[in-house]
Image: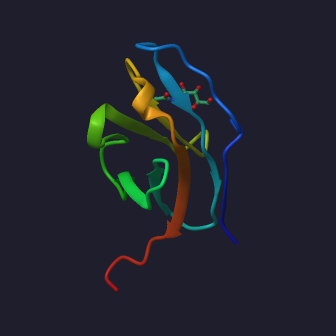
Amino acid sequence: AQSVTQPDVRVTVSEEATLQLRCKYSSSVPPSLFWYVQYPQQGLQLLLKYYSGDPVVQGVNGFEAEFNKSDSSFHLRKASVHWSDSAVYFCALSAQCLGL
Ligand SMILES: *[C@@H]1O[C@H](CO)[C@@H](O)[C@H](O)[C@H]1NC(C)=O
């Protein structure tokens, strides 16, 4: 069984401050991790993904996330947020099926 938990239900950040949204995961196998964003009146868009390698992943629009295996976390960060970053953010996980 696998799951993700986002402890920050609602986050308020001042303009140009740094946003952090936490994601903790539980997985019995090496996970692939994703952050998606849903802007008002729009569908889901992929911000970034982690499969393996460098634990710091750069995404679109200045977003980045860091995979921390010992902490089972994949927190999203963005420096200097703008009001237009107001959205719903989703952390997601899938099991890796390398070679398939
Ligand atoms: C990963 O998480 C652990 C436990 O919270 C923390 O001590 C460590 O500094 C983190 N590693 C990085 C690279 O942030």
Outermost front residue: 41
Up-down relation of residue 27 to residue 63 (above or below): below
Which residue shows up at 37% across the image and 56% down it? 46
Up-down relation of residue 10 to residue 37 (above or below): above
Q: Nearer the viewer, residue 51 or 81?
A: 81
Colour logic: rainbow
Up-down relation of residue 100 to residue 13 (above or below): below
Q: Nearer the viewer, residue 72 or 41?
A: 41
Quadrant for ligand 1? top right
Which residue shows up at 44% across the image and 57% down it? 42
Q: Nearer the viewer, residue 68 or 82?
A: 82
Outermost bottom residue: 100
Q: Nearer the viewer, residue 75 or 47?
A: 47
Q: Whole-percent x and y of residue 83?
A: 44, 25
Please tell me in which quadrant of the rendered image residue 4 appears: bottom right
Q: Whole-percent x and y of residue 41?
A: 48, 54
Which residue shows up at 38% across the image and 20% down it? 79
- Along the horizontal axis of the image, is 66 left or right of 88? left
Which residue shows up at 61% across the image and 23% down it? 12
Q: Whole-percent x and y of residue 73?
A: 57, 42
- Along the horizontal axis of the image, is 8 left or right of 60? right
Q: Whole-percent x and y of residue 35?
A: 46, 51
Can you say which quadrant of the picture contains the N terminus? bottom right
Can you say which quadrant of the picture contains the C terminus? bottom left
Count of marks placed on residues? 0
